[in-house]
Image (cartoon, rainbow, N blue to C red):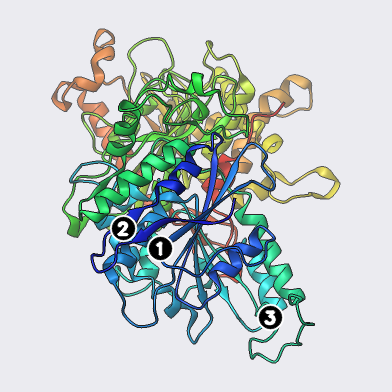
């Protein structure tokens, strides 16, 4: 098909009108849709860029409104490619209402949103011309809730790609940008003083932000570059275009709330609903629209995206999908490809004190699917990426049914709610759960406290020690303080249960290729967190050889090596050597039982007045130490980490540690 007008402005009214013929073309598309929209100032070559994306000549007309072009996807045969080309906004003020509505439509319909400008003066000023981005959180909401903030909205927005055109050719700068994975933030100046500046809004709202530079297509950009023969594109432009094309066409298909891919039927009806609301100046509630479309029609709203790239289910199978219910997952875990991602319950605080990423309740960050695959929850990741403050990450690991979640709730100062607790012999927490809170300690004002509660190790029902090893390795990699929780005493049995420490070198390397395939254990200490051993239900006296000792003395005595080289001695020393070498900063806390045995199943409902006073004193001392002494999470080089990415102190920021670590897969 040729491009056709999809949405046109109604003259003199500011309203928008949908072309029924274009809707009919969309409705015949039964495959997942990859929707790429372009928006920007007049005269910047938007239509030319879209034409080149699919290797065509001049296909898109230079006409008002939004034009659509439906094509087979050139690299994904199971998807359809939908291109949206929008009229440019003028250099001076134009019809701001119409342009804002066109911008909002582009963002809501696309899986990749391209902002196209020319390089004129300060490039960031070109980004700050996108003033319409301020209307996004004002007009569009995921839920009809007063407490919603930009973190929730960012979880459903498309990739943001800024195409900066007609720049001076600079191969070195292109290489640097490619080495930094075209991250937009790396090219921006320091954060804007005004939180509502367009560039700040883009950084806050869009979870994925990229930048691509283009020299003049014909080498006539006035920068002194060599002219290309007539009819040919400049070689550097072709190379830059190839990079952009590879990225733009490799992204996931269009999804709506709940991470569900859509077909042309749904997208057409979705478009009509949004145009109707925008034309009446009414807010857009995305969940309400999606549920309403599904309930009022006999077609499927869509199907969950398979992160492994599998084929979508049949429409008959997809039609059995249930309406979306946005609430945090608490107890029962399902793999991401078969369920909607949990959405955050955000802190209900006054707007003036709201902190990006603050959560009233925990949510799952990394799911552990039944087949042992570790999968990122994209909604949780989007929320984490909204945290701009330095993060202090405290993770807890240990055997299942040892009270880890209860201890983490004490750290969060939550008597009720918080991390879900269990009162049976079954493991309760699955995967890794996250809770982001404003750091309560005065020494960490302006920081975010990230608590990670991990799935219990050694669950007999799961019976997968390799999966346990990955959970433990992730807790080590992500945290600045690691709490290992156990019951009883630190004896040989407890040491044997800590065999995951001795397996760390199997799963983690400090560098890509160590000399002779081996690494010095002491190298790990530069990357690993502070280690705290929490011994629960401890009923012994802290005495050694008749004299009183501290809890730290108790731990260090348990780590004393035996002399000799027999197999038995080597096995005895192995976990002790690993603990000493991997974690040079160690601390120990012991806790008496909080209540009598028959009351343990109701522990989460009991007030502090019902708990053993000694336990309360020990728990208070533990929490004070963890909150006071836990450091900001850093990566090699000492760069502090925010929720969004590492701080750019060096020439090339390191990859986000949460994203990198959580992409680990279960070994075969």
What is the C-alpha distance between the residues marked 3 and 1? Answer: 35 Å
Q: Earlier in the sequence, mark 2 or mark 3?
A: 2
Pointers 1 and 2 in contact (C-beta within 8 Å): yes
Give above or below for 642 relative to 665. below
Quarter occupied by the C terminus: top right
Place of residue 615 in the rendered image (x, y in percent of width and height, measured from the top left): 26, 27
Determine whether, in the image, residue 320 is placed left or right of residue 646. Answer: left
Cβ–Cβ under 8 Å for marks 3 and 1: no
Secondary element under disc 3, as helix, strand or loop, is loop
Residue 514 shows up from this direction: yes
Q: Quadrant of residue 364?
A: top left
Q: Is residue 283 left or right of residue 127?
A: left
CA distance separating discs 2 and 3? 42 Å
The label on residue 16 is 2
Q: Secondary structure at mark 2?
A: strand
| 324 relative position to 430: left or right | left
| Residue 466 in the figure: left or right of residue 445 | right
Name the residue beneath numbered marker 3. Answer: 170
Tell me the crowding category of disc 1: few under 14, some 14 to 19, or many 20 or more residues within 10 angstroms, Cα based.
Answer: many
| Label 2 packing within 10 angstroms: few (<14), some (14-19), many (20+) | many
Residue that lies at the very extreme toward the right in this rendered image: 516
Q: Which residue is mark 1?
A: 65
Q: Is residue 531 visible?
A: no
Name of the residue lying farthest toward the front = 21
- Quadrant in the picture for residue 219: bottom right
């Amino acid at each position: 098909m040729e491009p056709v007008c999809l949405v046109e402005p109604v003259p003199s009214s500011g309203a928008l009108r949908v072309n029924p013929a274009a809707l009919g073309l969309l409705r015949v598309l039964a495959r997942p849709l990859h929707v790429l929209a372009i928006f920007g100032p007049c005269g910047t070559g938007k239509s030319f860029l879209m034409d080149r994306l699919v290797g065509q000549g001049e296909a898109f007309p230079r006409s008002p409104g939004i034009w659509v072009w439906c094509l087979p996807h050139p690299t994904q045969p199971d998807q359809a490619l939908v291109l949206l080309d929008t009229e440019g906004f003028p250099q001076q003020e134009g019809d701001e209402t119409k342009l804002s509505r066109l911008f909002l439509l582009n963002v809501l319909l696309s899986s990749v949103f391209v902002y196209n400008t020319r390089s004129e003066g300060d490039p960031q000023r070109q980004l700050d011309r996108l003033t319409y981005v301020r209307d996004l959180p004002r007009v569009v909401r995921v839920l009809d809730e007063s407490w919603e903030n930009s973190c929730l909205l960012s979880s459903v927005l498309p990739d943001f790609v800024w195409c900066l055109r007609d720049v001076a050719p600079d191969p070195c700068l292109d290489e640097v940008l490619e080495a930094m994975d075209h991250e937009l933030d790396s090219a921006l100046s320091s954060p804007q003083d005004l939180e509502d500046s367009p560039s700040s809004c883009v950084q806050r709202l869009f979870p994925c932000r990229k930048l691509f530079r283009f020299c003049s297509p014909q080498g006539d950009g006035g920068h002194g570059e060599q002219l290309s023969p007539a009819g040919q594109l400049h070689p550097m432009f072709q190379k830059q275009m190839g990079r952009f094309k590879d990225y733009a066409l490799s992204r996931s298909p269009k999804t709506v709330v709940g991470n569900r891919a859509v077909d042309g039927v749904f997208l057409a009806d979705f478009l009509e609903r949004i145009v109707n609301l925008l034309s009446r100046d009414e807010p857009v509630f995305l969940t309400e629209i999606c549920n309403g479309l599904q309930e009022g029609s006999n077609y499927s709203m869509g199907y969950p995206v398979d992160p492994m790239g599998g084929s979508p289910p049949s429409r008959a199978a997809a039609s059995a999908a249930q309406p979306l219910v946005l609430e945090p997952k608490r107890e029962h875990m399902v793999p991401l490809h078969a369920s909607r991602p949990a959405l955050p319950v955000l802190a209900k605080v006054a707007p003036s004190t709201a902190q990006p990423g603050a959560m009233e309740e925990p949510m799952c960050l990394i799911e552990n699917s039944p087949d042992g695959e570790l999968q990122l929850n994209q909604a949780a990741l989007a929320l984490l990426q909204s945290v701009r403050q330095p993060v202090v990450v405290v993770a807890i690991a240990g055997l299942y049914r040892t009270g880890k979640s209860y201890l983490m709730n004490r750290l969060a100062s939550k008597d009720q709610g918080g991390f879900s607790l269990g009162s049976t012999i079954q493991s309760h927490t699955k995967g890794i759960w996250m809770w982001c809170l404003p750091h309560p300690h005065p020494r960490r004002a302006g920081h975010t406290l990230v608590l990670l509660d991990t799935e219990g190790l050694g669950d007999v029902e799961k019976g997968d020690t390799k999966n346990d090893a990955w959970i433990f390795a992730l807790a080590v990699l992500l945290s600045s303080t690691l709490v290992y929780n156990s019951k009883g005493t630190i004896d040989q049995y407890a040491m044997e249960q800590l065999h995951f420490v001795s397996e760390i070198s199997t799963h983690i390397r400090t560098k890509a290729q160590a000399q002779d395939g081996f690494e010095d254990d002491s190298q790990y200490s530069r990357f690993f967190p502070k280690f705290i051993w929490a011994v629960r239900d401890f009923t012994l006296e802290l005495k050694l050889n008749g004299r009183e000792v501290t809890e730290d003395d108790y731990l260090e005595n348990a780590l004393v090596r035996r002399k000799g080289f027999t197999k038995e001695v080597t096995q005895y020393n192995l976990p002790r050597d690993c603990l000493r070498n991997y974690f040079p900063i160690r601390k120990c806390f012991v806790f008496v039982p909080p209540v009598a045995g028959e009351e343990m199943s109701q522990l989460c409902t009991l007030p502090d007045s019902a708990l053993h006073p000694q336990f309360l004193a020990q728990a208070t001392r533990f929490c004070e130490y963890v909150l006071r002494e836990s450091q900001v999470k850093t990566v090699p080089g000492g760069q502090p980490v925010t929720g969004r990415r590492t701080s750019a102190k060096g020439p090339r920021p390191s990859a986000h540690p949460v994203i990198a670590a959580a992409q680990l897969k279960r070994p075969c």
